[in-house]
């Protein structure tokens, strides 16, 4: 008779299986209740008939005596406090008649009779009556002794020593997720499934689990290692067979992803399998390789292939799946109990499962290497996740075409780019390197990267994943690009802004070194764009002054005397617009602080700016423009200047009183939050100058109006916060908080002292 090796399940797996099993047995829905260390609730139902609690104890290697002792010592006091109407115990330990009587006596009246005590034999018997439930739980189904015998021990079903070696470990750590269900459905309907995804996301693992699924249903599994022609040699008409072709487009080169005419033979095999009952084909590839192959081999874009592709997305690995993956790997890793126990701490597991670069392969490799090297495994895991090079380095440096790498390098200078701009800059880059540049080559490179390393939507191109952008930044800083040629190929000012901004990141030292090494090219590019009205940097910046200040900062960053001289020359003439006085004043401060600018010129420029602001301020006061006047006055006060400001202050007070009189004479408008700062500034200025008594009645009216606007602002803010909290709270409760609670409870199982 078939049975189940429940010991292959983790504590969490066992609890989830028990939830579904006992919901069916008891006829009520049970919830997994994330418990604290002193609550004693695993599964619970609360209804009109009272509260039912199911306690799950997954101790497959424990003796009955140990289990009973721990239940009475640890759980009985909690049960008496909870006082449920019914208490059911489910355990993976075998229970004898005497053992059940002892537990019933101890837990009465909460345990109604010995029928509420389920040992491993009773649980297995109930599972065997529910094959549909078993099939819903992949890991439970895989623990079936019949399936395990087929999958792990019967050579006639498993025609590959490599698969034979990999399956047991993968079966222990695999976590079914949405991507797996999609692939399983595709395999059921098409008999062929191509699993694509980024490196490390779990393509091979999923292929092996699909093979295991079919093996459990009587299929032989055959590994294809070299060429699709191997299928023909292994084919037997009277036998159910599944063929696994891992990395069928290769791993390290794009030069020859398929052997001669293999795409035609591949299509023939796919069609043959799809038309033959009892045959299946599972293939894996990196998604960017698949796109490249489709470009080079038109026939791979045919429906026979495209309709069988299932891409594993990072979003398939949601928070709860990530937590289960981490738990399974730590649970089965060759680590000391103390190392495993550390992952029970939220401060350790939370940054791992929430990490933007979460990757099952990195988790597995970190645990494997750390166990071997005696490292601090938790610290090593975060360091590996923080460093995207382990994921992307081999791809970018060894596997992509030069054309594709050059697209990534150019895109980094944009961050996000219009397709036309990206192509133009890429063309110039290629030409600067004396390499061919044409539209077809660019489109092939883009198609290779689209959906994998890049996203192309509505004519805009962005990096598909933050870790890719991180790696390209490292790639540029490490001197792996033709930096001088890249700088010469820039067509937009924002590309230079982007490269300079990258130097200020924590890992930007490499790009800074490259910019310094190529300072003449950088200086020429900046000055060249200044002369080009269509591509100049100041076109998209707030002002000419702010842009010149950025050039001066860049000059200091690169120790560039030529750029500093350029800024000095550009500030010899006062071409200033009134709306950018604060920018011009900031530029003056930067000139005075720069060691690359002659100080006599800097001081002269600063004085000229102060005089210009002074003259503009007089005009604003004469025009009774209070708000512009106070803005200019504050700016002038912040600058070192020899200008006399006493007469200015008197005129400003008079201007403020005129504005106060005007406001008080008007009917009070509906409070508008946008006016609060203006009203407060007027009131505060008159208070500072001691002029509130000049027009006391008007001052009181305007101050009261300012208070009304302040109250309206606070009410508006409170209403917004209330709506925002209402909008966020359901999702937070049902998703993030729930997932964190479940992961917390799961990880506590790693703490053997619990």
Image (cartoon, helix red, strand yellow):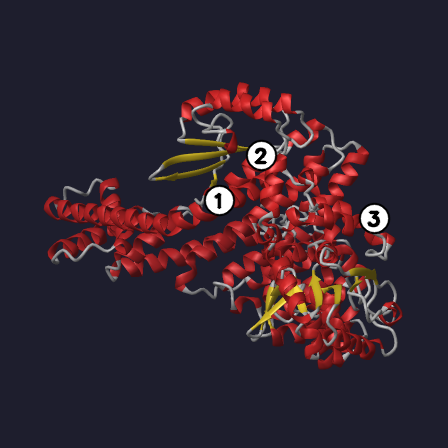
Which percent across, then down, holds residue 201? 69, 54
Which residue is painted at 66% across and 57% down in the image?
Answer: 469
Determine contact: label 1, label 2, CB under 8 Å.
no
Which residue is painted at 71% across and 35% down in the image?
Answer: 377
Q: Which residue is mark 1?
A: 23
Disc 2 is placed on an element classified as: helix
**Quarter of image, res 209:** bottom right
Q: Which residue is mark 3?
A: 165
Badge 1 or badge 3: first in the primary sequence: 1
Mark 1, other Cα within 10 Å: few <14 / some 14–19 / many ≥20: some
Q: Which residue is mark 2?
A: 347
Q: Is residue 138 above or below residue 34?
A: below
Badge 3 or badge 2: first in the primary sequence: 3
Depth order, front residue of 38/496 = 38
Q: Is residue 720 left or right of residue 383?
A: left
Which percent across, then down, holds residue 552? 60, 55
Q: CA distance from mark 1 to mark 3?
A: 37 Å
Q: Is residue 453 above or below residue 201?
A: below
């Amino acid at each position: 008779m078939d049975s189940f090796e429940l010991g292959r399940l983790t504590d969490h797996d066992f609890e989830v299986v028990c939830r579904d099993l006992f919901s069916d047995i008891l006829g009520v829905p049970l919830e997994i209740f994330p418990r604290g260390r002193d609550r004693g609730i695993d599964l619970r139902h609360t209804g009109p008939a009272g509260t039912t609690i199911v306690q799950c104890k997954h101790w497959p290697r424990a003796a009955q005596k140990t289990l009973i002792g721990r239940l009475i010592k640890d759980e009985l006091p909690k049960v008496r406090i909870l006082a449920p109407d019914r208490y059911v115990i489910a355990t993976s330990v075998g229970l004898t008649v005497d053992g059940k009587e002892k537990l019933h006596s101890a837990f009465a009246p909460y345990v109604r009779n010995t029928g509420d005590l389920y040992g491993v034999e009773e649980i297995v018997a109930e599972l065997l009556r529910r094959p549909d439930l078993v099939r819903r739980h992949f890991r439970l189904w895989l623990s079936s002794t019949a399936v395990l015998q087929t999958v792990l021990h019967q050579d006639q079903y498993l025609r590959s020593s490599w698969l034979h070696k990999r399956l047991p470990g993968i079966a222990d750590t695999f976590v079914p997720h949405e991507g797996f269900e999609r692939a399983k459905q595709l395999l059921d309907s098409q008999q062929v499934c191509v699993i694509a995804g980024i490196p490390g996301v779990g393509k091979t693992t999923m292929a092996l689990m699909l093979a295991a699924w079919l093996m459990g249903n009587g299929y032989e599994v055959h590994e294809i290692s070299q060429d699709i022609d191997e299928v023909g040699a292994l084919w037997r008409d009277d036998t159910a067979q599944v063929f696994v072709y891992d990395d069928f487009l290769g791993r390290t080169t794009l030069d020859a992803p398929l052997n001669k005419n293999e795409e035609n033979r591949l299509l023939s095999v796919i069609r043959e399998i799809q038309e033959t009952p009892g045959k299946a084909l599972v293939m894996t590839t990196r998604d960017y390789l698949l796109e490249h192959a489709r470009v080079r081999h038109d026939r791979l874009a045919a429906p026979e292939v495209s309709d069988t592709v299932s891409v594993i997305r990072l979003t398939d690995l949601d928070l709860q799946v990530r937590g289960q993956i981490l738990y399974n790997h730590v649970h089965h890793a060759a680590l000391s109990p103390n190392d495993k126990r550390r992952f029970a701490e939220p401060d350790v597991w939370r940054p791992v499962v929430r990490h933007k670069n979460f990757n099952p392969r990195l988790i597995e490799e970190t645990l494997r290497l750390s166990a071997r090297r005696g490292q601090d495994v938790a610290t090593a895991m975060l360091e590996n996740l923080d460093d995207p090079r382990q994921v992307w380095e081999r791809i970018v440096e060894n596997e992509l075409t030069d054309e594709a790498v050059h697209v990534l390098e150019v895109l980094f200078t944009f961050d996000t780019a219009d397709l036309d701009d990206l192509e133009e800059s890429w063309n110039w880059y290629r030409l600067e390197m004396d390499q061919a540049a044409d539209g077809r080559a660019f489109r092939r490179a883009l198609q290779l990267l689209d959906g994998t390393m890049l996203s192309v939507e509505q004519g805009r191109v962005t990096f598909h994943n933050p870790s890719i952008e991180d790696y390209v930044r490292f790639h540029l800083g490490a001197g792996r690009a033709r930096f001088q040629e890249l700088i010469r190929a820039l067509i937009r000012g924002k590309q230079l802004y982007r490269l300079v901004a990258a130097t200020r990141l924590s890992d930007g030292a490499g790009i800074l070194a490259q910019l310094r090494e190529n300072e003449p090219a950088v200086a020429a590019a900046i000055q060249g764009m200044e002369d080009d009205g269509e591509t100049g940097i100041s076109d998209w910046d707030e002002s000419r002054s702010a842009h010149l200040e950025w050039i001066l900062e860049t000059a200091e960053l690169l120790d560039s005397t030529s750029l500093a001289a350029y800024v000095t020359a550009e500030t010899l003439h006062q071409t200033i617009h009134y709306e950018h006085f604060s920018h011009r004043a900031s530029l003056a401060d930067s000139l005075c602080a720069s060691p690359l600018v002659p100080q006599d010129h800097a001081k002269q420029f600063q004085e000229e700016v102060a005089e210009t602001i002074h003259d503009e301020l007089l005009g604003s006061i004469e025009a009774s423009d209070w708000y512009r006047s106070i803005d200019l006055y504050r700016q002038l006060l912040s600058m070192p200047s020899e200008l006399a400001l006493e007469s200015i202050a008197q005129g400003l007070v008079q201007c403020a009183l005129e504005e106060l009189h005007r406001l008080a004479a008007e009917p009070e408008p509906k409070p508008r939050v946008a006016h609060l700062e203006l009203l407060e500034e007027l009131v505060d200025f008159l208070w500072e100058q001691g002029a509130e008594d000049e027009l006391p009645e008007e001052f009181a009216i305007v101050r009261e109006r300012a208070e009304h606007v302040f109250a309206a602002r606070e009410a508006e803010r409170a209403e917004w916060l209330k709506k925002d909290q209402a909008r966020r709270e359901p999702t937070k409760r049902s998703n993030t908080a729930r997932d964190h609670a479940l992961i917390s409870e799961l990880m506590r199982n790693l703490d053997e002292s619990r």
